[in-house]
Amino acid sequence: MEQMPKVKHVLTTKEFDRPFLDYLCNLTNRIREMHRTPEGALKLRSLWPHKRLMLYFTQPSSRTFLSFLAAGQNLGMDCAEIRDPRTSSEVKGESFFDAIRTFSSYVDIIAMRTPERNLAEQAAAHLDQTPRPVPIINAGSGPDQHPTQALLDVYTILRSFKEIGGIDGKTIAMVGDLKRGRTVRSLSYLMKNFHDVNLIFVSPEQFKMEDDILDFLRRHHIPYSETDQLKDAVAQADAVYLTRIQDEHDQMVGASAQVDYQPFYFTPAHLALLKPRGIVMHPLPRRQELDPACDSDPRVKIWRQERNGMWVRTALLHMILKNTEEISL
Ligand code: ASP
Ligand code: CP
C-alpha cells in the first residue's frame, strides 16, 4: 500500500483530500477482509491493546457510539465512556476544557458528540496547548458537522458504484432537513474530491442548505441545484440521500411540526423512478422519510451503510494511532 497520509484530529470534512479518502477506503477493505477469519480478527486485536479510546457522547447516539466502541475493540483498544453528562464532574462546576484535559490524562483518542457546534475544534485547539495533545474525533457537533458519517457514506457510495466509475460523474440528491443536517453538510464538503459531481438539494423552503455550504460548492466549482420536487430529483439521481427533520435544534418546541415534510417521504413509488443502478441512503435513525417497505430492494443501502461505519472507523482509528504513536510514550 502507498504511504499512509497524516491524520490527527478529525474535526470537519473540509480537510480531507483524495489521497486520504483513497487510503482510508483501501485500508477499510483490507480490515474487513482480514476480519473474516478468526486469525485475521485476532491479529487486528493484537494491534493496539496498549491504547485507550474515550467516547464522550453527551448527545444521544446508537450507531456512532456502538460502531466506535466496536471499532476500538476490533483493534484491541480499551474503551471508556461518558454518555450522561450528570456523571461527569462538569456538574460540580468543572469547565468543559478542564474536563477534556482530564479525559486526555487517561486515554489516547477522544471521540466526542455534543449538542454544541464547534466544540470538537475548541477541544482540539485546547489540547494542542497541553503536553498531552491527544487526537479528537468529532462524532457529531450540533447541527454542524459529522465527519466520520460522511467518510462512511463516501465509502458506501464508492463500493456501490465500484463497477461504474465510483463517485466521479454522478448525480447525488440530498433530501430533507439540509439546513440542520450535519450529515449532508459534511458529505457536501467531501464532494470537492471527485470529478464532475452534480448535487441536487431537495428540501422544504424552511430547511434549505445553508449559504456557507453553497459558497464552498461554488468556490470548488461543484454544480448544484435546489428544488422541492422529490420525484424529479429521484429520476435524475444516481444516489438519493435521505434525512430526518432535526427537530432537536428547533428554537421553539414543536416548530418543525409546522413544516409539511410529507412531500419528502420516500416510498416504493419513488423506487420505481430510481435508475436500475441507483442507490438510496440514509444515515439513520429514520422516521417516516424512508418507508421500510423499500428496505428489501437491493438498491437501498441503509443497513450496509450502518455496518460500513464500524469498518471505516476501525481504519480511521488505526491511521490516527499510527500517526500519533509517540504521544503516550
Ligand atoms: N444520526 C445522524 C446524526 O447524528 C442523523 C440523524 O440523527 O438524523 O446526525
Ligand atoms: N448515523 C448516526 O450518527 O446515528 P446515531 O445518531 O445513532 O449515532
Image: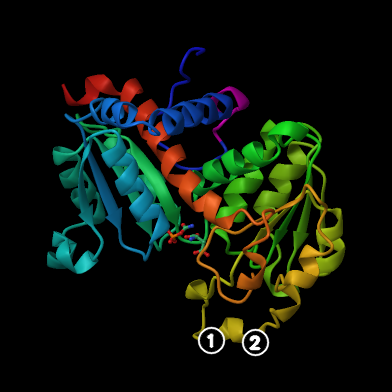
Q: Is residue 149 left or right of residue 171?
A: left
Q: Is residue 21 above or below residue 237?
A: above
Q: Tell whether label 2 touches label 1 (CB within 8 Å).
A: yes
Q: Residue at x 65, y 72 (%)?
A: 293
x, y percent for residue 231: 84, 67
Q: Nearer the viewer, residue 48 or 144?
A: 48
In the picture of the structure, the residue carrying the numbered disc 1 is: 254
Indicate whether residue 87 is drawn in magenta. no
Farthest-out residue, top: 2
User: Is ligand 1 within 8 Å of the beta carbon of the residue shown at mark 1?
Assistant: no
Q: Amino acid at mark 2?
A: Gln
Q: Is residue 106 left or right of residue 235?
A: left
Q: Is residue 165 above or below residue 119?
A: above
x, y percent for residue 297: 68, 60
Q: Is residue 117 above or below residue 18?
A: below
Tell me if mark 1 has few (under 14), some (14-19) or many (20+) residues whose alpha carbon lies within 10 angstroms of its own: few
Q: Is residue 329 left or right of residue 187?
A: left
Q: Amino acid at mark 1?
A: Gly
Disc number placed over residue 306 in the picture, else none: none
Q: Nearer the viewer, residue 92 or 169?
A: 169
Look at the image and give the residue range highlighted in magenta.
15-20
Q: Is residue 272 visible?
A: yes
x, y percent for residue 206: 70, 74
